[in-house]
């Protein structure tokens, strides 16, 4: 009902300052998925920037900091999905969250970079993989790194013998690499059978900074996938609502957050009686 949605959006804009962080996030995603997002997303971003400015004046430990961080990152994600993310919100979030890391459990000492124990070319001593099956350090910056994960390696859930986390810990004994509340510094994961680049933060400041970049669409993830069957060349995107709870697999249904994956056919192939498609996705 278009009329009802517009009335709901108008009412929400008038009372944004009364919403807590989770409720503000729900409104942002609801409007982003509805297609009537412009006025509401603009107002939500102004309200989020206002709250971030207030948070700069106090020690974040006095507030429900985790809730506020997740709410801010979620608003950035929702507004970016709707194509309405303002640079003002993105810059404010970058600044405040990186500053906030200095307060988090004495983070000035926790986020100090510790010198690596191993050279870039040295394979992980914990690995039992073959010589050409080790992870590779692709990029090493003072506060973050990029690792190429081979197939058969798990990122950190300890369900498999080969753990990328052990490889990271063998190179850098940073506090965040032992902090499960921050995903051990990993920005994202790849499934065990997959190979590809993994970004990890060495400091808490870098972790917050990378999270903002990811939600704001400043980090792109491109994959090449071999699929069973023939993927239709006319299809350029896959849109679906997805949801997840805890460690359960992500599912698609009428509920959940809207997601979009861009796809492009690279090749079609036949092998005996089977059809395959090589697809590039983003």
Image: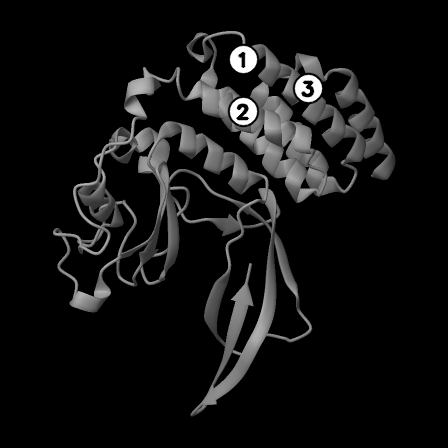
Position of 231 relative to 33 (above/below): below
Position of 175 relative to 225 (above/below): above
Which residue corresponds to mark 2?
A: 95
Point out residue 147 in the picture as x, y percentages from the top left corner. 33, 52
Point out residue 41 in the picture as x, y percentages from the top left corner. 73, 31
Categorize mark 1 by other alpha carbons within 10 Å: few (<14), some (14-19), many (20+). Answer: some
Q: Quadrant of the N terminus?
A: top right
Q: Nearer the viewer, residue 33 or 138?
A: 138
**Res 190 visible:** no
Q: Secondary structure at mark 2?
A: helix
Q: Nearer the viewer, mark 2 or mark 3?
A: 2
Q: Secondary structure at mark 3?
A: helix
Using the rendered view, name the quadrant where residue 204 is placed: top left
Using the rendered view, name the quadrant where residue 89 is placed: top right
Q: Secondary structure at mark 1?
A: loop
Query: Residue 271 vs residue 231: left or right?
Result: left
Categorize mark 3 by other alpha carbons within 10 Å: few (<14), some (14-19), many (20+). Answer: some
Query: Residue 272 vs residue 88: left or right?
Result: left
Q: Residue at x 21, y 35 (%)?
A: 173
Q: Mark 1 or mark 3: name the one nearer the start of the chain.
A: 3
Q: Are marks 2 and 1 in contact (CB under 8 Å)?
A: yes
Disc number at residue 47? 3
Q: How far apart, in angstroms, are the residues tagged by discs 2 and 1?
A: 9 Å
Q: Nearer the viewer, mark 1 or mark 3?
A: 1
Which residue corresponds to mark 1?
A: 56
Q: Residue at x 27, y 35 (%)?
A: 177
Q: Residue at x 53, y 21 (%)?
A: 96
């Amino acid at each position: 009902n278009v009329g009802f949605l517009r009335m709901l959006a108008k009412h929400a804009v008038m009372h944004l300052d009364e919403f807590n962080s989770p409720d503000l996030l729900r409104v942002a995603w609801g409007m982003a998925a509805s297609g009537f997002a412009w006025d509401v997303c603009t107002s939500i971003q102004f309200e989020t920037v206002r709250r971030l400015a207030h948070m700069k004046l106090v020690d974040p430990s006095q507030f429900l900091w985790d809730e506020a961080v997740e709410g801010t990152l979620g608003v950035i994600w929702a507004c970016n999905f709707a194509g309405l993310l303002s640079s003002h919100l993105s810059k404010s979030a970058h600044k405040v969250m990186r500053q906030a890391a200095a307060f988090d459990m004495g983070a000035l000492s926790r986020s100090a970079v510790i010198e690596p124990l191993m050279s870039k070319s040295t394979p992980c001593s914990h690995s039992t993989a073959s010589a050409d099956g080790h992870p590779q350090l692709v990029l090493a910056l003072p506060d973050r790194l990029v690792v190429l994960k081979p197939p058969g390696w798990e990122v950190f859930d300890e369900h498999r013998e080969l753990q990328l986390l052990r490889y990271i810990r063998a190179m850098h004994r940073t506090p965040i690499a032992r902090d499960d509340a921050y995903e051990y510094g990993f920005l994202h994961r790849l499934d065990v059978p997959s190979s590809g680049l993994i970004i990890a933060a060495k400091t808490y400041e870098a972790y917050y900074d990378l999270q903002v970049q990811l939600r704001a669409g400043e980090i792109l993830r491109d994959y090449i996938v071999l699929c069973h069957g023939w993927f239709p060349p006319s299809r350029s995107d896959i849109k679906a609502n997805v949801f997840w709870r805890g460690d359960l697999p992500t599912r698609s249904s009428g509920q959940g957050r809207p997601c979009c994956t861009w796809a492009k056919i690279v090749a079609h192939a036949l092998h005996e009686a089977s059809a395959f498609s090589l697809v590039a996705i983003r």
